[in-house]
Amino acid sequence: MFLIELTYKVPFSEIEPFMPEHLAFVERGYASGHFLASGRKVPRTGGLIFCQADNREAVEKLMQEDPFVYQDLVELRVVEFVASRAVEGMKGLLE
């Protein structure tokens, strides 16, 4: 399991034009089964994505398809963790 943190490096006005392409990227991540949850941080300084993948390298490769990343608009941080507990509706994360 991975937590992906995106932190804006530029003002939101420079992020906004790439938002439709970023959202399409996120949709592809859900469709492929990689993304489990996502959303913006509060305050709006970036976003977080819960991701499942075989390894860190796969996550980093996947994230190179995000326009926020390849346009160098965000700082990308990938944190790997092992889920040891989950609420009933998320027990599948423990497998």
Image: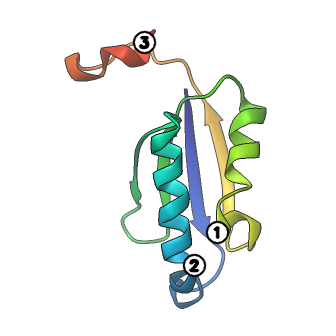
Q: Determine the secondary structure under disc 1.
A: helix
Q: Quadrant of residue 59?
A: top right
**Residue at horizontal 22%, vertical 22%?**
89
- Residue 7 place in picture, x, y as percent: 59, 64
Reading the image, the residue beneath label 2 is: 18
* 9 or 22, nearer to the observer: 22
- Residue 39 place in picture, x, y as percent: 39, 56
Assess whether mark 1 and mark 2 are in contact (beta carbons under 8 angstroms). Answer: yes
Q: Amino acid at mark 3?
A: Leu
- From what the image shows, is residue 89 above or below residue 64? above
Q: Sort mark 3 into few (<14), some (14-19) or many (20+) by Cα contacts within 10 Å.
A: few
Q: Sort mark 1 into few (<14), some (14-19) or many (20+) by Cα contacts within 10 Å.
A: many
From mark 3 to mark 1, how far is it between C-alphas? 30 Å
Viewport quadrant of the C terminus: top left
Say the numbered circle drawn on residue 35. Answer: none
> Nearer the N terminus, badge 3 or badge 1?
1
Viewport quadrant of the N terminus: top right
Say the numbered circle drawn on residue 94. Answer: 3
Reading the image, the residue beneath label 1 is: 68
**Residue at horizontal 50%, vertical 62%?**
24
> Nearer the N terminus, badge 2 or badge 1?
2
